[in-house]
């Protein structure tokens, strides 16, 4: 059966999913904000609406999964370091080619993961609940014929860049996986999105295999989603550092908020794409781009300008804080692709991405954190001088209420609430200030505003 036929046979998710119990897991709902459950409910409702209106026909689903199959393989492998793009991945899978200039292992990884995802779709046809045998089944395909395929490890492993220490021997791994399986069986009626978040995150926490844990965990995540009637989710290479940060936070304190936020955002993107395909199948297709080459040039100009701007911000911060304070910078893999740029120009949040985080501290005075991210222009910015749609940079700060980790608060943004370019002019940024005023500023002036505002915020945080 095709992936389309498989998903078409799934049951309709409840529009008001029940509260899930996390008893027996390393996680707690107390550490997860209510907005996660609210967002889960909204996404379940959207899937139900699509089905109720008859838009999820077999042709629609076949078209959607046909478009996404190679992208899903390429992006999941890229999280683990594969350099193959979607086109190269397709050649490796369809023609069995070793891509020139790349290690043959990357092509084999693409073939293996494609087979695992095909098996995932077969498993999703069944109404049974995910078990350890399913996990080992998927892992055996992810690793192909490599040693250890489908076998829980008996030796300790180290997760690169993480302080988390997984179970160190076979007995401890097996014990942890028995708890994992018991929760899965006991909570078979929990909302698909929450099951996907918990089972995926917990599996990466246990790290039950010597290799292939990430790819297998993401396959399990999508098994839960597809079985529950959702389109599969793609965690993209641009999400890599954000993904690792979110997993690290869930490992250290049982807080699922950051990883839930990322998975729910990508689930919303997948639903948006599915809705777009449904519209196209019914004879209507939004025109994403009239001049593709112009979009490629604009995307490259935007990325170069953003890199320059935040390099200037870093320099200004060094000058403002000097030897009395410290600013750490966390860059995310968030260079816009052409498709991201087009999506943001159309007001589509699937192009959103985290850009850079600044953690500023002056010992004995105070500390603060600031997250810059790329989204689509606000109504105010689009209306200014007829600038129209396009990408813009916004700021989020830690939510003082604790409702969620990050909160967009224009009034509290460091110096500039929103920044964009009116191409072809790259000498000045169009800046919407925290008081709502919009004006043009040279990159050095933007950087100065941002650095001074961060310093003032740190001083006020004591």
Image (cartoon, rainbow, N blue to C red):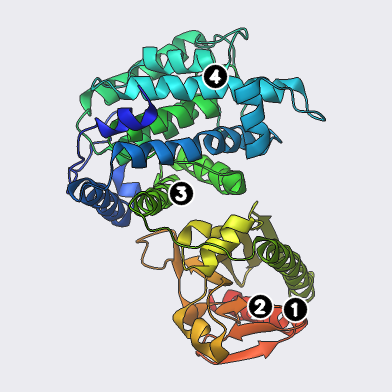
Q: Are marks 2 and 1 in contact (CB under 8 Å)?
A: yes
Tag 2 residue? 421
Mark 4 or 1, nearer chain start: 4
Tell me what residue is drawn at x 47 percent, y 68 percent.
347
As rendered, which of 303 and 56 lies closer to the eye? Answer: 56
Residue under label 1: 426
Q: Quadrant of the N terminus?
A: top left
Which residue position is annotated with label 3? Answer: 262
Q: Quick check: marks 2 and 4 in contact, CB under 8 Å?
A: no
- The number of callouts visible is 4
- Residue 259 in view, yes or no: yes
Q: Earlier in the sequence, mark 2 or mark 1?
A: 2
Vertically, is 405 above or below 141?
below
Q: In x, y percent, where is residue 62? A: 39, 36
**Residue 313 marker:** none
The outermost residue toward the right is 101
Q: Count neighbours of disc 2 (C-alpha within 10 A) and say few if under 14, some if 14 to 19, many if 20 or more.
A: many
Asked where in the image residue 87 lies, by quadrant, the reply is top right
Compute the Cα span from label 2 to label 4: 43 Å
Disc 4 designates what residue? 142
């Amino acid at each position: 059966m095709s992936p389309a036929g498989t998903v078409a046979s799934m049951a309709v998710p409840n529009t008001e999913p029940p509260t899930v119990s996390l008893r027996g897991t390393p996680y707690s709902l107390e550490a997860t904000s209510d907005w996660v459950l609210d967002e889960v409910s909204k996404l379940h409702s959207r899937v139900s609406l699509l089905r109720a209106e008859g838009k999820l026909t077999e042709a629609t689903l076949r078209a959607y999964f046909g478009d996404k199959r190679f992208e899903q393989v390429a992006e999941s492998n890229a999280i683990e370091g594969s350099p193959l793009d979607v086109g190269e991945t397709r050649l490796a899978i369809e023609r069995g080619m070793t891509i020139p200039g790349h290690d043959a292992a990357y092509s084999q990884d693409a073939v293996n993961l494609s087979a695992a995802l095909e098996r995932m779709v077969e498993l999703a046809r069944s109404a049974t609940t995910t078990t350890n045998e399913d996990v080992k089944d998927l892992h055996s395909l992810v690793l192909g014929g490599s040693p250890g395929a489908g076998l829980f490890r008996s030796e300790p492993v180290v997760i690169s860049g993480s302080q988390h220490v997984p179970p160190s021997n076979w007995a401890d791994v097996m014990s942890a996986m028995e708890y994992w399986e018991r929760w899965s069986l006991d909570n078979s009626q929990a909302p698909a999105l929450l099951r996907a978040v918990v089972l995926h995150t917990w599996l990466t926490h246990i790290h039950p295999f010597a290799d292939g844990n990430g790819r297998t965990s993401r396959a399990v995540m999508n098994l839960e989603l597809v079985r529950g009637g959702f389109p599969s989710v793609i965690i993209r290479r641009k999400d890599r550092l954000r993904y690792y940060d979110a997993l690290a936070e869930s490992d250290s304190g049982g807080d699922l908020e950051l990883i839930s936020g990322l998975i729910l955002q990508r689930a919303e993107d997948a639903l948006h794409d599915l809705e777009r395909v449904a519209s196209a199948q019914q004879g209507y297709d939004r025109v994403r781009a009239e001049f593709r080459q112009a979009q490629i040039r604009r995307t490259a100009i935007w990325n170069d300008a953003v890199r320059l701007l935040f390099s200037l911000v870093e320099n200004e911060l060094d000058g403002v804080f000097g030897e009395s304070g410290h600013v750490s910078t966390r860059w995310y893999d968030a260079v816009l692709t052409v498709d991201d740029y087009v999506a943001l120009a159309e007001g589509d949040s699937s192009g959103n991405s985290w850009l850079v985080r600044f953690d500023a501290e002056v010992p004995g005075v105070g500390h603060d954190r600031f997250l810059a991210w790329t989204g689509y222009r606000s109504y105010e910015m689009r209306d200014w001088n007829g600038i129209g749609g396009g990408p813009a940079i916004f700021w989020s700060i830690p939510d003082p209420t604790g409702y969620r980790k990050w909160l967009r608060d224009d009034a509290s943004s460091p110096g500039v609430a929103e920044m964009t370019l009116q191409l072809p002019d790259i000498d000045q940024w169009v800046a919407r200030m925290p008081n709502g005023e919009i004006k043009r500023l040279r990159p050095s002036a933007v950087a100065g505003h941002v650095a001074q505002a961060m310093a003032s915020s740190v001083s006020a945080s004591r």
